[in-house]
Image (cartoon, rainbow, N blue to C red):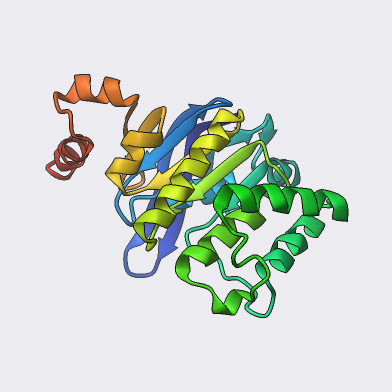
Amino acid sequence: MIEALHLTKTFRDKKRGEIRAADDISFRVSPGQIYGLLGANGAGKTTTLRLLATLLKPTGGSATVGGFDVAREPEKVRAQVGFLAASTALYGRLTAREMIAYFGKLNGLADAEIRARTQRIADELGMHDFLDRRCDTFSTGMKQKTSIARTLIHDPAVMIFDEPTLGLDVMTARAIVKFVRECRNRGKTVIYSTHVMSEVEKLCDTIGIIHGGKLMAEGTLAGLRATYGEQDMEEIFVKIVGAEDAK
C-alpha cells in the first residue's frame, strides 16, 4: 500500500547551504501493518511523512500510496490518506462534532454517513463527554482526539500519525495507542512516527530508525534485538545513532 524508493527532499538554507531533510529513503508498508518511524526531533520523520501525504514534493526518488504516485497523482493519494500532523489547529468556535462534520463534508460524505462514522469514532476514542463542546475549551488530549477523528472521518485505507501522543497524559496516550492498534486490526496501513521507545515496542510490526534524514536501520523488534545484541529499544537506538555520529 505504501512504497518509498530513494525518496529525497532537499532544502536551501542561506547559512548552511543544502540540507537533506530526507536522504535516499526506501521502505514498504503493507495493509494490516504498523510501520514505526523512530527518530529524535529533527531526524527527518515529519519531512518523510509530508512527502508521502503530498504536502511536500520530492526532490528525488519516488513514492506510491495505494498504487498512486505522490508527485504525479497527488489528489488520488490524498483520497487514500488520513494524515495527523504533529501540530494542527482546530477552529475554536466549532464543537468537536461540527469540526468532524466539516471535514466529512470536505471529503464528500453524506450527512447520515458523517453521523454514523462520528458515533463510531467517538465510541472508540471516548469523546462523548465533549463532543458537543467548543474546541476552544478543550484540554490537549481532547484536541488531539478531535484531530484524529477529523483526520479519519473519511475512513482512509492509509493512516499516517506524526507524534500522536506528544504532550498527552498517560491515560489519553494509552487510548490513542489502543486506537492505532485497532486500525491495524481492521486492515489499515499505518505509519506511526514517534520518539517514544515504548510505543514502538508495543505497536510496530516493522521499525525504521531515521537519523540525519537517513534510514539507518530497519526490521522487526526481534530482528533488531538479534542484530544489535540488545533487548532494550533505547539501547538499540543509541547504538545505531551513536555509531553514525561517531563517523
* Vertical relation: 84 (above or below) 241: below
Tell whether 31 sits left or right of 102.
left
Residue extending furthest front? 129
Residue 112 visible, this angle: yes
* Residue 136 percent coordinates (x, y): 58, 79
Return the residue nearer the eye: 82 or 40. 82
* Vertical relation: 185 (above or below) 193: above
- Which quadrant holds residue 223? top left
Residue 58 visible, this angle: no
Residue appearing at x 37%, y 63% in the figure: 167
* Residue 135 percent coordinates (x, y): 60, 74
Residue appearing at x 64%, y 73% in the figure: 133
* Residue 168 percent coordinates (x, y): 39, 61
- Which quadrant holds residue 245? top left
- On-image quarter of the C terminus: top left
Tell whether 13 sits left or right of 197.
right
- On-image quarter of the N terminus: top right
Return the residue nearer the eye: 69 or 30. 30
Return the residue nearer the eye: 96 or 126. 126
Tell whether 166 sits left or right of 131.
left
* Residue 238 percent coordinates (x, y): 17, 41
* Vertical relation: 200 (above or below) 105: above
